[in-house]
Amino acid sequence: MKTSHIFGLVVRTTGLIIIVFGFIYILDGFVILLEPTFRSQPMWHYFIDGAMLSLVGLFLLRGAPHVVRFAYPNNSCEKDTSHDA
């Protein structure tokens, strides 16, 4: 497996983790909306942060090939270390 493939997998996994945190923020916003005595910060803060995190995570999931191409511009000089038969 090439290092660029491993890097792409890491980028996608990071994007998935960021999306999960974004959904947790949005869920916290709904909890604050439904339970007004549980307010520690304004609820719009949670919705905006959750949306921003979800968008960044979605970009990392969908845009991983662009990030990999930016990080590894010359894939042709990298040797494949896998020994597939």
Image (spheres, grey):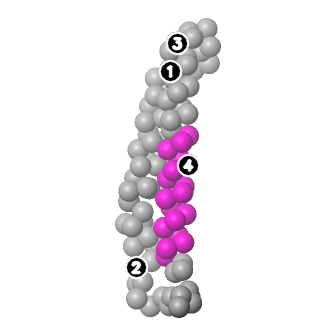
Specify whether residue 66 is in view: yes
Q: Which mark is residue 73?
A: 2
Q: Indicate the secondary structure of the residue bearing disc 2.
A: loop
Hey, what amino acid is under mark 2?
Pro
- Residue 29 at what x, y percent from top left? 51, 23
Q: CA distance from mark 2 to mark 3?
A: 49 Å
Q: Residue at x 44, y 31 (%)?
A: 48
Amino acid type, label 3: Leu
Q: Earlier in the sequence, mark 1 or mark 4?
A: 4
Helix, strand or loop at label 1? It is helix
Dot 4, how many residues are within 10 Å of its Cα: few (below 14), some (14-19), or many (20+)?
Answer: few
Magenta stretch prevailing secondary structure? helix
Q: CA distance from mark 2 to mark 4?
A: 26 Å
40 vs 6, nearest the viewer: 6
Badges 1 and 3: C-beta atoms under 8 Å apart? Answer: yes
Query: Mark 3 highlights which residue?
Result: 34
Q: Residue furthest front?
A: 85
| Label 3 neighbour load within 10 Å: few <14, some 14-19, many 20+ | few
Around disc 2, counting alpha carbons within 10 Å, would you say few (fewer than 14), some (14 to 19), or many (20 or more)?
A: few
| Mark whose residue sits in front, 2 or 1 | 1
